[in-house]
Amino acid sequence: MRAFLLFICSLPLFCIAQESDSITSLPSVQIIGKKINRLPGSGQVIDAKKLALLNQTDINKVLRTIPGVYIRDEEGFGLRPNIGLRGTQVNRSAKITLMEDGVLMAPAPYADPSAYYFPTFARIDRVEVLKGSSQIKYGPYTIGGAINLVSTPFPSTFKTFAQVSVGSFQTNQQRIWLGNSTKNIDFLFEINRHASTGFKEIDGGGNSGFDRRDFLGKIRWHSTSSAKVQQSVTLKVLNMSERGNESYLGLTFDDFNINPNRRYAATQKDKLDVTHQHITLNHTIALSKNSNLSTTGYLSYTYRDWGRVNSISGQSVTTILVNPDLYASAFGIMRGGTNGPVVFQNAARTFFGKGVESTFQYKLTKTKVKQLIQLGVRLHKDKADRYATQSGFVMSAGRLIQTTAGVRGNSENQIRLANTLAVFIQDDIKWGSLTISPGIRYENILLSLDNFGTADSERLGASLKTATNHVTAFLPGVGINYVANPRVSIFGGIHKGFSPPGMPSITATIQAKPEEAWSYEAGLRTQNKYWNIQLAGFLNQYENILGSDNQSGGGAGTGDMFNAGNAKTMGIESNIETDIVSLFCAGKKYRTPLSITYTFTRAVFNTTFSNAGGDWGIGLIQKNDWIPFLTPHLLTISAGFETNRFNTTALARYTGITRIKPGQGNNIQTPQKDVAYNNVNALKAYWVIDISSNYKISSKTTLFATLNNALNTTYIVANLPQGYRPGMPIAVMTGVKVNF
């Protein structure tokens, strides 16, 4: 904690922006305003009402109701989602801009972009997904899109809320918050706990679940409505801790086929500890009737230690899983039936992030052509300290016993730094029904790596190797929206997207270039009292598409980034919402909402290259090979029944055949009995159905229940990081919500 406080004292000055519907309003944490029909690009919102209907603690299930979103599940509870947008890679959500209340949330988005922290979803009030040219305001990752999670808002009057639930696998959740808004002061305090013993069965026994707790406090001072100068100051403090028993290690298909929820004996000691602290301070002032300035300083600290089995009898666990017959002795140790040596790695990493961002807005309204000019500046620094340890164990009679204690840094010993400046300017020009939004973003990024080597635990510098990479980018874009009539709007845009190149390599002669893409989209929105429809087509033309060598993506874990030439992702997004009853018989006292979301994606490499490992495997990758893990067909159907006191919603999610290796044509081989692991290039398609219900006992009390995977479907969600991983089996959750 002392180090955290010292880090606060070192916070430099700098600036950023946030958008609001009214130029003189108090600060808004939303990136998508109320007038979504005038948005010059694709955007979807899941508000508090929709979230309450679904009753989900898993962000993955909720995001699947939005088109253009790709999910790779991992541990079954949605604690560490792998998210991609419009064809970006999904691994660790490292290719999209993630925000909470408009502020970057990833622990080190430039120096080490893997998002090992994700907010406790139960406390999220609103989910916003922005795609298209408008996202140039919210970098650094501007190819696919941005996701903003909005925390619990200040209540208008004194209010207390409590939620308690219990369910399968001893899963339980408790949430309580209280808040108030007065003449000058608003406040909110919130406590959440989410825990489970887990659904996976560890050989030799043990808990495969987690225990996550967080505290959120925020307070806002604002001037009275009669004050000559309208301004506000908002302080937000967040503390989260998680103690989990999750493993990187999955199963062979033969073992998966017998018991998909099994975990091998070698994972008995696998644990994940995460601590995350975040502080933001925002000041917003109305400089005039037509202008305001919003400035936010933020500081974050994240500690993550993922202890996991690394090798057995001198062989990596991945090597053993690929060919268990060849390494039968080591495989026997992994399963606990044979005695032998095991190497355990504590992948300890500490992240610091700090920055200041300011946005100035000026509104011109006195002419026929109205304008909203926005200028934003952000200074940001982040640091990733990798200080991993390897220890020795022995498998004896089915139990792991430690034999040697590792020395800090003997597995990984390096510091990654990023210093960045980002500037954007955008002008929303409104002329009658037409809105044109030209803009440009500038990124200046200095990346540095200090690798001390695994023999220098004290970091004295005897074997220090360094590398740097300096990247600049100008990213123009323009979006167009035309409101044809109150029910129909047409939108489109073009912008140059960007992803930073990650950490420089100490072995590469030429450092990785940033990933860039020209992105195009066109679509329409239409709505009336019967339906709400959004259709969009998109095309991303990549230059220097980036891959990474991370263990989470199936690589060796060096963390090096590499370029793989050109690529193209294109697709169609559609979302249709209606009420079946209102279509045929208006005036009924009940509602039958229906929503259909479908995404088609074609993602291929445009060049031939040889790949050494990481995201796309090992070997020659041909032009027109499909990019793996980007499922061509995604479909979600939500159907419900609602009265004034009761509602129920069924959510059916279809995931099409997903390639896990680059390839083309109909040469598809899914996991089958006696099929070698290396010969599998795709995962089978599957359906999963979730059902949630709410019953309002009174105006203040609501009972709810959720049935996940109602048909108890057995399915493989991934073959990463190491081996086949199951989706959660059938699970029930029931509880009560009370407003005081």
Image (tube, rainbow, N blue to C red):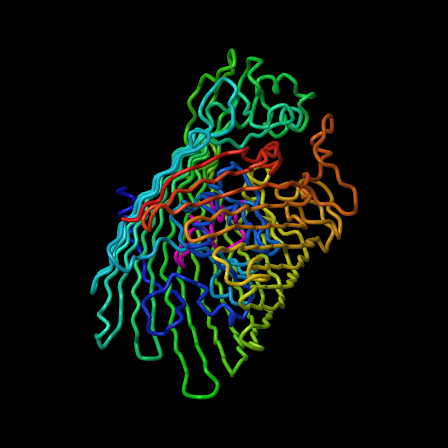
Q: Residue furthest right?
A: 666
Q: Which one is in front, 273 or 697? A: 697
Q: Quadrant of the N terminus?
A: top left
From where the camera sits, is residue 46 visible?
A: yes
Q: Which one is in front, 649 or 375? A: 649
Q: Which one is in front, 476 or 262? A: 262
Image position, residue 704 (x, y; %): 42, 42
Q: Quadrant of residue 388?
A: top left
The residue at the point 74 percent across, 44 percent down is: 620
Q: Quadrant of residue 577?
A: bottom right
Image position, residue 532 (x, y; %): 56, 64
Q: Is residue 474 left or right of residue 194?
A: right
Q: Is residue 213 left or right of residue 581?
A: left
Q: Is residue 527 left or right of residue 208?
A: right
The residue at the point 52 percent across, 37 percent down is: 76
The residue at the point 56 percent across, 27 percent down is: 261
Q: Which one is in front, 24 or 353? A: 24
Image position, residue 437 (x, y; %): 52, 75
Q: In the displayed structure, would residue 267 be above or below residue 348?
A: above
Residue 114 drawn in magenta: yes
From where the camera sits, is residue 213 visible?
A: no
Q: In the displayed structure, would residue 654 be above or below residue 312?
A: below
| Residue interval drawn in magenta | 92-116
Q: In the displayed structure, would residue 648 be above or below residue 678?
A: below
Q: Is residue 378 left or right of residue 141?
A: left
